[in-house]
């Protein structure tokens, strides 16, 4: 049964490529994207998601190759409100305008954090199943984003410092799931923040190893019991299945060349 409760925003990879390097995954991959394969992989993800949720599309823009990663467009709040991103890198800053227009045209109240605070949307801000928000900072989003989001949303916001440049967005290393579960990669965080995740999620965190982390297993889309991700080891699948989830692998190798996978290619509206 499609979960009509969820709607995701996606952006067709018409102009997707690796043109510049703003994260370690992109290094050495400039001009190396197989555009036809990328289009097929994206379409496959679209098909898998559209069988389970509704999908809306934002118009791709020439010269903005990373706009496919709609997770970074903003953070959607209740009641048709959105905090639109202020991107760290000049290469992505023009995207904000296009995401803003999409939200305005769709009847959202568009907010910004202001005061020059950098914030990269749902790439760095994740709701857990209790409604709290977890915000990653240090690489793309500023630490000041934490209190600014809390003020706008009136919800509890927990900050997590990202300590390794490979895990530059929170959604590359952490994924809250339904019913209080989560997937996480400890090496992306300080020992203290690993403890905070443990305290909050208790035994319901599945900690992934280096191999699964590098396959972007934390960059997952959870719809009902389904978890859609690029690749998971047999061990990871077993553990998640034991917790009642069903794993669906959707290969997105061409997008990993730009440092993003399944979750980055979607924004929950
Ligand atoms: N090349 C993009 C960047 O570095 C990838 C963004 C991935 N998005 C995400 N939500 N992790 O900004």
Image (cartoon, rainbow, N blue to C red):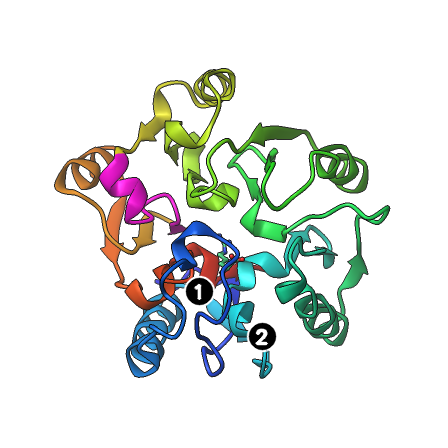
Helix, strand or loop under label 1: loop
Quarter occupied by residue 53: bottom left
**Label 1 lies in ligand 1 vicinity (Cβ under 8 Å):** no
Q: Which mark is on residue 53?
A: 1
Q: Residue 185 location, x and y as percent? A: 37, 33
Residue drawn at x 48%, y 41% is 165
Q: Residue 97 location, x and y as percent? A: 74, 71
Quarter occupied by residue 212: top left
Question: From this viewpoint, which residue is outermost toward the right?
Answer: 115
For the residues labelled 2 and 1, the Cα–Cα distance comes to 26 Å
First in residue order: circle 2 vs circle 1: 1
Residue bounds of the magenta highlight: 210-223
Left or right: 190, with 213 as reference point? right
Neighbour tally class for label 1: few under 14, some 14-19, many 20 plus, Cα within 10 Å = some
Q: Residue 229 location, x and y as percent? A: 31, 53
| Pointer 2 residue | 64
Q: Is residue 63 above or below residue 93?
A: below
């Amino acid at each position: 049964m499609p979960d009509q409760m969820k709607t995701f925003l996606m952006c067709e990879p018409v102009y997707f490529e690796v043109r510049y390097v703003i994260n370690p995954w992109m290094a050495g991959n400039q001009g190396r994207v197989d555009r036809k394969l990328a289009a097929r992989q994206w379409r496959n993800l679209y098909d898998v998601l559209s069988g389970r949720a509704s999908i809306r599309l934002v118009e791709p823009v020439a010269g903005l190759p990373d706009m496919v990663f709609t997770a970074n467009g903003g953070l959607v709040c209740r009641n048709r409100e959105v905090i639109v991103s202020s991107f760290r890198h000049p290469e992505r800053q023009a995207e904000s305008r296009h995401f803003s227009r999409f939200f305005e045209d769709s009847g959202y109240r568009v907010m910004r954090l202001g005061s020059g605070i950098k914030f990269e949307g749902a790439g760095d801000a994740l709701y857990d199943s209790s409604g709290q928000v977890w915000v990653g900072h240090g690489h793309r989003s500023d630490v000041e984003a934490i209190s600014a989001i809390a003020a706008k949303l009136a919800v509890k916001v927990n900050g997590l410092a990202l300590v390794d440049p490979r895990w530059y967005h929170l959604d590359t290393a952490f994924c809250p799931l339904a019913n209080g579960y989560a997937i996480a990669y400890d090496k992306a965080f300080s020992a203290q923040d690993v403890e905070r995740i443990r305290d909050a999620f208790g035994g319901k965190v599945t900690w992934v190893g280096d191999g699964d982390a590098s396959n972007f297993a934390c960059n997952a889309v959870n719809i009902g019991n389904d978890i859609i991700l690029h690749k998971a080891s047999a061990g990871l699948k077993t553990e998640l299945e034991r917790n009642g989830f069903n794993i669906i692998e959707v290969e997105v190798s061409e997008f990993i060349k730009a440092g993003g996978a399944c979750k980055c290619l979607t924004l929950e509206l």
